[in-house]
Amino acid sequence: MSERKVAFVTGALGGIGSEICRQLVKANYKVIATVVPREEDREKQWLKSEGFQQEDVRFVLTDLTHHADATSAIEDAIQAEGRVDVLVNNAGITRDATFKKMSFEQWSQVIDTNLKTLFTVTHPVFNQMLEQKQGRIVNISSVNGLKGQFGQANYSAAKAGMIGFTKALAQEGARSNVCVNVVAPGYTATPMVTAMREEVVKSIEDQIPLQRLAQPEEIAAAVMYLVGEYGTYITGETLSINGGLYMQ
Ligand code: CAA
């Protein structure tokens, strides 16, 4: 059984995911980090560049959309650490297109990765948390799950689905002291956003009252608040970090 608190993060080397991992390790968590296997050894390089030790992060190389393989890899990691205190469902992709032009493949890839994998990851972790009688889950949704976005019918549907999932799970987890919340980032300075056409990014920036993109640190800090010592009485909530782009 790990002496340190254990946090489980999906999409762990992405723009926001890597910052969440960084802040968790700095707060002395052992992190179980899921990463889609690629040819280059991104994991070792990342540990080295951060100055972290091998024992700080257990990488689980798995494609979460392959349900059976991913489930067994996740269960092995939980068993090896003996506990999970925090889960951050962060893995996500975009396949933007106007709905008129959207293919079924673009629709399915986003629903499969951003929504269906919530079951694959959360089911084993949530059950462990119920047994422990404590846990915090943070689901990373998006401003576009709240307001909808031109060109993102697939992504907006998946990210809105995460919010309903969160509210249901928050009700089921409460009696076991498991809190479940959403962080809904706005447009954040990550490769996902900078991959958009320059004029599209510019037109979005022009709509943001704070007149800039978010930094990944600002999103990760909200996650740390929800999983930290003062996040004990918040559950089923959606915390927007969007520079005022959408006010509910
Ligand atoms: N509202 C209304 N009309 C719009 C519009 C908007 N927001 N955006 C574009 N249009 C109009 C255009 O003016 C254009 O009109 P005309 O045909 O009259 O010229 C028409 O719709 C087609 O637009 P595009 O030329 O942009 O169409 P396209 O097929 O080349 O590109 C697209 C479509 C890829 C979806 C592109 O519009 C785009 O990238 N949009 C932004 C999508 C976006 O915000 N993605 C977020 C990614 S980051 C992320 O998802 C992280 C997060 O959580 C925030």
Image: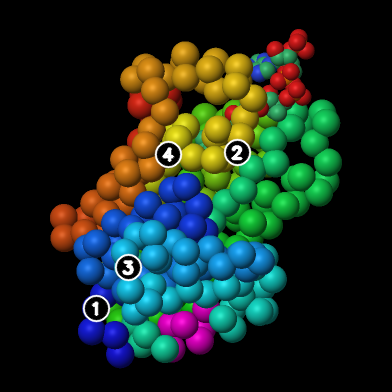
Give the distance between the C-alpha atoms of the residues marked 4 and 1, in whole angstroms.
Answer: 28 Å
Give the distance between the C-alpha atoms of the residues marked 1 and 3, in whole angstroms.
Answer: 15 Å
In the rendered structure, which amino acid carries the disc numbered 2?
Ser
Q: Which residue is mark 3?
A: 52
Q: Which residue is mark 4?
A: 185
| Residue depth check, mark 1 versus mark 3: number of the one nearer the observer | 3
Q: Is residue 78 magenta?
A: yes
> What's the mark number on residue 223?
none
> What's the mark number on residue 156?
2
The residue at the point 59 percent across, 78 percent down is: 71
| Residue depth check, mark 2 versus mark 4: number of the one nearer the observer | 4
Labels 4 and 1: the sequence-earlier one: 1
Labels 1 and 3: the sequence-earlier one: 1
In the rendered structure, which amino acid carries the disc numbered 3?
Phe
Ligand 1 near label 3 (Cβ, under 8 Å)? no
The residue at the point 27 percent across, 70 percent down is: 29
Dominant secondary-structure state across the stretch colored magenta? helix
The residue at the point 53 percent across, 17 percent down is: 202
Would you place residue 140 above or below residue 100 in this image? below
Give the distance between the C-alpha atoms of the residues marked 3 and 2, in whole angstroms.
Answer: 35 Å
Q: Which stretch appears magenta? A: 74-79
Does the rendering let one see residue 176? no
Give the distance between the C-alpha atoms of the residues marked 1 and 2, in whole angstroms.
Answer: 36 Å
Asked if labels 1 and 4 touch by Cβ distance under 8 angstroms, the answer is no
Labels 1 and 2: the sequence-earlier one: 1
| Residue depth check, mark 3 versus mark 4: number of the one nearer the observer | 3
Give the distance between the C-alpha atoms of the residues marked 3 and 4, in whole angstroms.
Answer: 27 Å
Q: Position of residue 133 (x, y in %)?
A: 28, 78
Q: Count the numbered circles shown.
A: 4
| Residue depth check, mark 1 versus mark 2: number of the one nearer the observer | 1
Ligand 1 near label 1 (Cβ, under 8 Å)? no
Ligand 1 near label 2 (Cβ, under 8 Å)? no
